[in-house]
Amino acid sequence: MVGDPPYRVAVDAGHGGNDPGARGVVEEKQVTAATAAALLQWLEQDPNYIPLQTRESFDATATPAQRAAVASAQSPQLLLSIHGNSAPEGSAASGFECYPSVPGRTWHQESYYFAQQLAQGMQAAGAKLRGHGGIRYIYYQGEVKQLVESTHTEVRDERSFTLLEDVNCPAVLAEQCFVTSEEDVAQFGSEEGCKTVARVYYEAICAYFGTQPLDTPL
């Protein structure tokens, strides 16, 4: 039950400012900013949505906790945090994966449903899905990050990503491509690739809220 539009959607570009994120063929912050900017354009054009941001500009440096606080203050109904993945030198890792709010949290079911829309959209766009249907969970044990597949539905005490834990709405963190993979970057991390992904994300948001996406411009 999502109520009537317009819906308030927070778009978070991971990293930025003094934090470049992962480095590879491109810097992660370039990919996240380009994708977020294109997604915000779609949402701004669509009267069904009120786009929100988690900081004043993509060049501003802000911690995940600060960005979650800015988002929550604007009463969002959904949050998407955009990221790029990376792998050690010599690795051929590629593909899409996303992380919803973990089992046991208030917004887990809604977050998981949104993650499904994102993963299905990226697969249809030609991305390889990593993990079980492209959806995984992250837990932190101290400073150690543990990845588990979404088939692991037990409720755990450890925290997941700060942004997912601290925002007061359903939320998903998406790793749209590996910035360390030339093929991945060409498809989903280049200037055109980021626009392609932004459209996928926009259509996933529309699917989540049950609205008709705007036509793709010629």
Image (cartoon, rainbow, N blue to C red):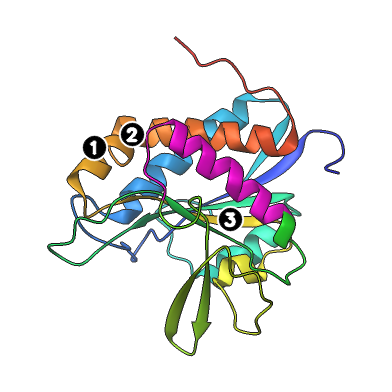
Image coordinates of residue 203 in percent, x first then y, are 58, 31
Q: Quadrant of residue 16?
A: bottom left
Is residue 111 in the magenta section?
Answer: yes
Residue to which mark 2 is pinned = 193
* Of 200 and 92, the residue lying toward us: 92
Is residue 203 in the magenta section?
Answer: no
Image coordinates of residue 32 in percent, x first then y, are 40, 49
Q: Amino acid at mark 1?
A: Ala
How far is disc 1 from disc 3 in space, using C-alphas?
A: 24 Å
Quadrant (top left, top right, bottom left, bottom right) of the N terminus: top right
Quadrant (top left, top right, bottom left, bottom right) of the C terminus: top left
The range drawn in magenta is 110-129
* Of 204 and 128, the residue lying toward us: 128
Q: Amino acid at mark 3?
A: Val
Q: How many marks?
A: 3
- Residue drawn where x is 68% and y is 69% of the image: 103
Residue to which mark 3 is pinned = 172
- Residue drawn where x is 30% and y is 34% of the image: 191
Asked if 123 appears above or below 178 in the picture, the reply is: above
Residue to which mark 1 is pinned = 186
Residue at the outermost left position: 90
Q: Amino acid at mark 2?
A: Gly
Residue at the outermost bottom position: 142
The mark that comes first in sequence, 1 or 3, is 3
How far is disc 3 from disc 2 in space, using C-alphas?
A: 20 Å
Image coordinates of residue 89 in percent, x first then y, are 14, 64
The mark that comes first in sequence, 3 or 2, is 3
SS at mark 1 in the image: helix
Image coordinates of residue 9 in percent, x first then y, are 67, 44
